[in-house]
Image (cartoon, coloured by chain):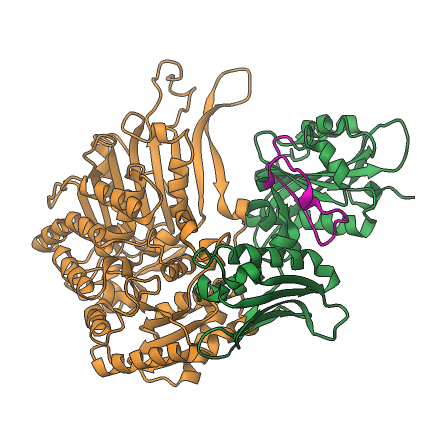
Chain colours: A orange, B green
Amino acid sequence: MTDQNEEQRHPFLKGLSKHRGAPPTVMVIFGASGDLTARKLVPAIFNLGVDNLLPGEFHLVGFGRKPIEDDSFREIMDGAIDEHSRRPLNKEIWERVRQNMVYHDGGYDDLAAFKSLAERIDQIEKDLGRDVQRLFYISTPPGVFQPIIKNLGKSGMAKAHVHTKLASKVIIEKPFGRDLDSARELNATINSVFEEPQVYRIDHYLGKETVQDLLVQRFANSIFEPMWNREYVDNVQITVAESLGVGTRGGYYDTSGALRDMIQNHTMQLVALTAMEPPVSLDPESIRDEKVKVLKAIQPLELKADGGDVVRARYTDGLVDGQPVKGYKEEEGIPYESSTETYAALKLSINNWRWQGVPFYIRSGKRMARRASEIAIQFKRPPGILFSEGKKFNVAPNTMVISIQPDEGVTLVMNSKIPGLETRTQPVKMHFRYSTTFGSNTPEAYERLILDAMIGDSTLFIRGDETEASWKLVTPILKHWEECGQNGMEEYASGSWGPLASERLLWEKNHQWRRSG
Amino acid sequence: MAELIDALPGIELPVGEVTTRLATMWDGGPMSSSSEFRASQMNVVLHFGLDVTAEEALERFETVLHFAQRYPSRIIVLCPSRNEGDGSMSAKLFSQCYIGESHREMCCCEALLLGYKSEDFGYLSNQVSVWLEPDLPTYHWFSGVPAKRIESYFDNLLIGVRRCVYDSSIEADDLSKLNWPSSASVSDLAKARLLPVRQAVGQFLSGYRIENLCLGLKRVTVSHCSTMSGEGQRLLEWIQECLSECTKCDDCGAKKADFALKNCDDTESDCSLSLEWEYDDDRYFKWRKFRDGSLGEIEASLGKSIQTIPTRVKPLAPEQALSEALFF
């Protein structure tokens, strides 16, 4: 995010954007035959190649348990680009990566497979006659995170070129643990092998343009920051809604749920970016320090089976996009006795100077009315002296809505006079849409994040203490729900905006959820 | 002889009506909502000289229009006139909506084309200021405007302009030598077009310590075809600038090396732009861009072995080069 190290850059990279100077890299993807590799990672690498952002020397090694021939792996990845890339497959460009792409099969707990991988990379380095960076992307089920990390340590790959700019780096996909204890255990394992600056915990939400733009909106516009506090903000609503159900991932989802799957990571990151204090600079550590501070300032939640600061629910059958869909318990792979939530809503209180008394409402769920992720800052109403006559004046609270998906943009709701002889008011919206203003072919989050890791910029990644601060808040809820079993589990019809209990969460302060989108 | 403004598209209108027409041109009826898609981010002034041909003017006008699809702009095109006349200006208005892949991507922009008496630049600044979008940055692209004329705009037309651009591969005068009010706010499109080259060469060379690259360096030669003279010059300057950053070797090769620029049109080589470094031992570094296509090649012996690496140096589209020159 910052070019402050321009002075220290190699002379032949000065003046080029920092993203145009990635060092020679061998990238290893663990879980290479998995869905994420095909849908996101390899298309992202292809698009980086199209934009000429890959280093001159770039090698890609797919690592997986399933034996696959190199040629077959290349063909599978060709198909993945064809199907999932935002730009069509350009064979001439892709060939440069393709010819340096191999598949390495082995078990994640098989040290010999890691040693032979290390030898393979050493040989690439020897053939090139130059040092290369090793970038490991762990895109596997969480159960094998620890064996992979341990074997990266034992095989010596984790320490390659350590303390230089070519030091090995590891990108880890969520979930970073299942609760506070397991997150601490995972962090301890990671930090026994890698130093923290080598670790890149990925949350793809942070790679989205609007999420990055949030810092710009807040700190580069002097009209918002003075109002970004308890004096002017009435409440903040963060929604991460999906219209899809669990689909074929029922078995996995039932061990996770909305709180672990969305709230603990994506939503809490949005809370942190919305509520944090201005960092002293844009360097990664300054930003992450502020995020941790605000996460630590969130008060423990009041937990009750009925009422309190938390609501959980699961979807029943209903209509989505006009089509009937089945309820969660009828989905494939869901046990009859399941007590997993597909929806969670929380009322957070941040106990610091800026936010005391301002509720942060967050919610996330599956099978909701529409897919929408947004942050809505609702400002306090002006004194009702002038425009308080009910029917004549329709005065809405000023609201700033930062939309993250499906359309990225910012909307400001203001009140305006309706043209005419009489003074009547009506809320109007001012829209800024990324796709209209800047064109729609913007990089996918994974492109930005892979490249950032490659060049060693950790700004948009999550630090170990951030994950622990977030788990510290969420783990008591998980324990409480475990104790309650089915007690307190609400239901909502597929295609709705959640259960009524979620609305009640806001009534106490006379608030209501805004209709997202 | 036909006037330049006549060669460009647009609807003629009296200059006195421009302000009103600009203000109302996107006001549609209830069925039309084009104004929703019009969100100017900047002003771009495309400023032609008298000797620019109709084809060249049209080509550059289209470049600005393509640019405006990505960065919605108020475009003002200044076309000097050869007619003596009474000094009156003429005007044309052009508008375009770019639809994109879906209506969500639609964006609209307008271009105001102004014909003005070439000698009468005293009032030009005032007139142009009337039609610039206020509060938005202004960029000025000079094409074929003589150096002397540009200098006369320093105190009027160019005040407050965020950046001026020109193309050294085309301009007859060396505009880099002008005493610009702020050299940091001047860009050369030829340098902007070098971006993929700087990227490919820079990424490769950054793998070596600068001291090692300088040690024993005897000669650096940049060869270019005649249509890439600006690129050749800027490439050589860039190499010199990078090598001059070697601070640890006061007496190293980079300080003594010859830096040469040559035209390669006469040779039978396939390349349009190339770079060659020679050392006092058996090391070398060569890069070349092939005349056709977007491929180039690095051949080097700087470390343990000889390396031959294909590099992708896909030329930037004209509008991409323009955005690179305007913003970076």
Q: Position of residue B95 (x, y in %)?
A: 70, 41
Does residue B316 appear to the left or right of A30 in the view shown? right
For image coordinates 46% across by 65% down, the residue present is A54
Q: Position of residue B52 (x, y in %)?
A: 81, 47
Task: Give the farthest residue toward the left.
Answer: A483
- Asked if residue A429 shows in the view, the reply is yes
> In which quarter of the view is residue A170 placed?
bottom left
Q: Position of residue B68 (x, y in %)?
A: 63, 46
Q: Nearer the viewer, residue B21 or A94?
A: A94
Does residue A34 appear to the left or right of A427 in the view shown? left
The quarter of the rendered structure image containing the C terminus of chain A is top left
**Residue A151, placed above or below residue B273:** below
Does residue A148 appear to the left or right of B112 in the view shown? left
Does the magenta segment cover residue A514? no
Task: Give the farthest residue toward the top.
Answer: A385
- Asked if residue A90 shows in the view, the reply is no
Magenta span: chief secondary structure: loop
Q: Nearer the viewer, residue B276 or A75?
A: B276
Q: Nearer the viewer, residue A45 or A435?
A: A45
**Residue B250, placed above or below residue B123:** below
Task: Give the farthest residue toward the front.
Answer: B251
Number of marks drawn = 0
For image coordinates 34% across by 72% down, the residue present is A28
Q: Position of residue A168 (x, y in %)?
A: 31, 66
Q: Which residues are magenta?
A: B159-183
